[in-house]
Amino acid sequence: MRIKVLILMLFSCLMISGLGFASDALVTINDQLIVDEGLVVVENGIPYGLVSDFAQRMNIEVEWLQNAKLAVLTIDGDYLSFKMDSNLLIINNKSYEMKHNSFADNGRIYIPFEVLAEKLGITYQWDATLLHMTIQNSELEVLPSEVKELNYTDDDLLWLSRIIEAETRGGSLDKKTAVANVVLNRVNSTQFPNSIYEVIFQRNQFPPAYKSGFMTKVPSDLSVAAAKRALMGVEVAKDCLYFNYIPFATKTDSFYKLIEGDYFYY
């Protein structure tokens, strides 16, 4: 029987833990890619799930006990308690240890996803390269407004992956995604051509596209993953239209940030 959702000022007084900034993961629920920043995040290579959101989606009661720093889920009469910044899991007053600590970020508590999935009866697959969590559970609610529609071809993915590979080489997933963002932002801008291929080959814009071997370049798995993430809506360089390995003297007012040696601009 479903339990009425009750969230009493859930985690409003939590302090952000010292673990650093986590990366958002892509999330597909019941074959639908959703737009929900922070539902699943990755910290030190480990995926974590947002307790309050998953509980709400499954109509599970959640209560935050401020003094004890515990998030308590009530599931079919059982009480599951997760302590903030701890590996402690308490089930009906019996304590267990998780492999990794829970943590709080922006007033929201996260626990290792493998534990959350086991306790909520969620089936999942984790793609560590793409940072993509695929989830199956018929009780998880997804609103129509959350569904992300994909609209790209295999050729789009190939050309975007190639230019990412040529421009970033040994860069991280975030750096590669930022370059992909610039290409896609140009496609969506009236200042540039309206296709990935045309943006890449626009005169004097992406010099590596004119080098020998580019037309047959085989992108790395990481470059393909970055292209997919950008096409699926991940934004590392939101709204940026330019990047360069040296600063642009004429674009100081539109500087966004430095990412692994490249300067990104709006």
Image: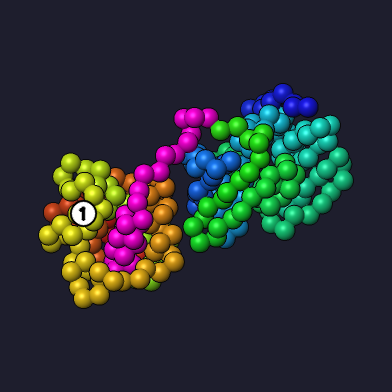
Residue beneath the point at 26% across and 53% down: 196
Q: Is residue 17 placed above or below 210 in the rendered structure?
A: above
- In this orientation, which residue lies closer to the viewer: 152 or 16? 152
Asked if residue 27 is positioned above or below residue 174 in the image, the reply reads above
Identified by mark 1, the residue type is Val
How many numbered dots are placed on residues in this image?
1
In the image, is 95 to the left or to the right of 138?
Answer: right
Secondary structure at badge 1 equals helix
Residue 7 seen anywhere in this rendered image of the structure:
yes
The residue pinned by badge 1 equals: 199
Q: Which residue is painted at 68% across and 44% down in the image?
A: 122
Q: Is residue 103 magenta?
A: no
Q: Position of residue 152 (x, y in %)?
A: 35, 48
Q: Does the magenta-highlighted stretch encompass residue 148?
A: yes
> Residue 151 location, x and y as percent?
36, 44
Q: Residue furthest bottom?
A: 212
Residue at 25% across, 69% down = 215
* Relative image position of residue 214 (x, y in whole percent): 25, 71
Q: Is residue 175 visible?
A: no
Give coordinates of residue 109: x percent, y percent.
Answer: 63, 42
Q: Depth check: give the residue in front, 229 or 153.
A: 153
Task: Magenta stretch: give its range.
Answer: 143-168
Residue at 21% from the left image edge and 76% from the top image edge: 212
Image-based side of 13 in relation to 1, left or right: left
131 relative position to 70: left or right = left
What is the magenta segment's predominant secondary structure? Answer: helix
Q: In the figure, residue 225 lies in which quadrant? A: bottom left
